[in-house]
Image (cartoon, helix red, strand yellow):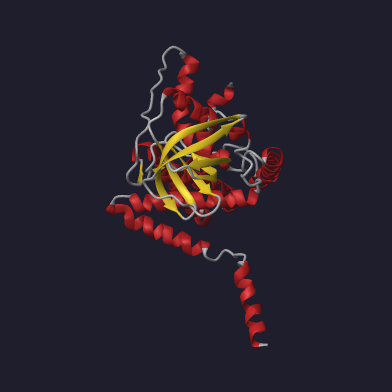
């Protein structure tokens, strides 16, 4: 039950190192080296254990992004509900809309931007303390700065979440693999495989060459158990042997049958995670780094013109630093010299 109050400790975690950097207050009264020796093994051990136990279902470090995104908005209502359970209310969000252009939701992202700016001030003060502060506190400054940089990465991921992607479909698509068939009006039958579906249509792959045209009306045959159902559709697009079908107006019973053949199938949700790769903590950490950088890049892209220059300089500087990270050569690149040597022989 107390996990509903996780927004409060998460906000404390995102601002805790600033207590020393900005206010010179010790939140943990211990040497920095002892803190690092005590905390780091526990963090690494917990990450490896979670990856081993939940690696098929959850990837490492992504819970940090999830909790950070929710922290600012769940902390007040959960605290109010604890003090006065009858005071809260539930707001229903709008559904079924379309997003015509990609943009940053500045209203939602304001808390994260405020925390980002606060941590950037902490970085600036930390650099000053490292060069001009007491020599005995240099290691404490380093530990606090590492903590702040980690918080900045997580906050960058939270900012990336606030970017509204362009949405052209009114209904979300569910990926799956299911055998089916389509029948033309002249009676020709083609076997196919359903690749994804939504409440308004399906994406199929015909086994063989597609002999249907865009705009043509066809019947889709789906099977559930021993029963087979027919649904009227219209071809929305044809790309090779991949075809997009749009459902024609269905009766109430046909809509019930379609839901039972797609959304209500037991194997649809039992196997939906089978295609997900196993968790690799280092790769997940790299993905979090990329997501955090993407969030700051979106801020630079959609920011007002007066501050775009500052963001561009910062993102260019980060890109330049990241370019020095060693990279594993691609297989094609490593094979090219040997291929040239064989060609010369």
Identity of the residue drawn at 42% across and 58% down: 315
Identity of the residue drawn at 63% across and 67% down: 331
**How many marks can you see?**
0
**Residue 165 position (above or below residue 83):** below
The quarter of the picture where residue 345 lies is bottom right
Figure quadrant of the N terminus: top right
Q: Is residue 19 in view from this perspective? A: no
Q: Position of residue 52 (x, y in %)?
A: 71, 41
Q: Position of residue 202 (x, y in %)?
A: 47, 40
Identity of the residue drawn at 48% across and 64% down: 320
Left or right: where 267 falls relative to 216:
right
Which one is nearer the viewer's eye here, 65 or 113?
A: 65
Q: Residue furthest bottom?
A: 345
**Residue 138 position (above or below residue 266):** below
Left or right: where 23 falls relative to 300:
right
Q: Is residue 160 in view from this perspective? A: yes
Q: Position of residue 300 (x, y in %)?
A: 37, 53
Which one is nearer the viewer's eye here, 228 or 118?
A: 228
Left or right: where 239 falls relative to 34:
left
Which one is nearer the viewer's eye here, 233 or 122?
A: 233
Q: Position of residue 101 (x, y in %)?
A: 33, 46
Q: Residue furthest front?
A: 186
């Amino acid at each position: 039950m107390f996990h509903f109050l996780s927004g409060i400790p998460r906000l404390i975690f995102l601002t805790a190192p600033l207590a020393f950097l900005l206010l010179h207050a010790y939140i943990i009264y211990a040497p920095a080296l002892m803190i690092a020796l005590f905390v780091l093994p526990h963090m690494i051990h917990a990450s490896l254990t979670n990856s081993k136990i939940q690696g098929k279902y959850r990837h490492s470090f992504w819970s940090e992004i999830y909790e950070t995104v929710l922290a600012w908005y769940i902390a007040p209502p959960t605290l109010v509900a604890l003090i006065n359970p009858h005071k809260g209310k539930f707001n229903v969000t709008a559904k079924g809309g379309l997003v015509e252009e990609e943009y940053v939701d500045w209203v939602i992202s304001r808390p994260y931007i405020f925390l980002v700016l606060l941590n950037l001030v902490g970085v600036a003060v930390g650099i000053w303390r490292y060069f001009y502060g007491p020599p005995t506190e240099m290691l404490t400054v380093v530990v606090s700065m590492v903590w702040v940089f980690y918080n900045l990465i997580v906050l960058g991921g939270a900012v990336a979440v606030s970017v509204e992607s362009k949405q052209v479909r009114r209904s979300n698509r569910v990926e799956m693999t299911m055998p089916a068939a389509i029948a033309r009006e002249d009676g020709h039958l083609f076997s196919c495989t359903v690749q994804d579906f939504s409440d308004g249509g399906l994406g199929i792959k015909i086994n063989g060459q597609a002999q249907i045209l865009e705009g043509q009306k066809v019947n889709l045959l789906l099977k559930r158990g021993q029963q087979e159902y027919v649904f009227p559709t219209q071809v929305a697009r044809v790309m090779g042997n991949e075809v997009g079908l749009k459902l024609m107006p269905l009766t109430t019973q046909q809509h019930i049958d379609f839901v039972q053949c797609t959304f209500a199938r037991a194997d649809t949700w039992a196997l939906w995670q089978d295609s997900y790769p196993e968790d690799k903590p280092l790769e997940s950490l790299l993905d979090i780094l990329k997501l955090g950088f993407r969030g700051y890049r979106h801020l630079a892209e959609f920011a007002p013109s007066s501050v775009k220059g500052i963001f561009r300089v910062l993102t260019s500087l980060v890109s330049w630093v990241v370019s020095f990270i060693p990279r594993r050569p691609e297989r094609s690149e490593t094979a090219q010299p040997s291929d040239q040597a064989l060609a010369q022989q």
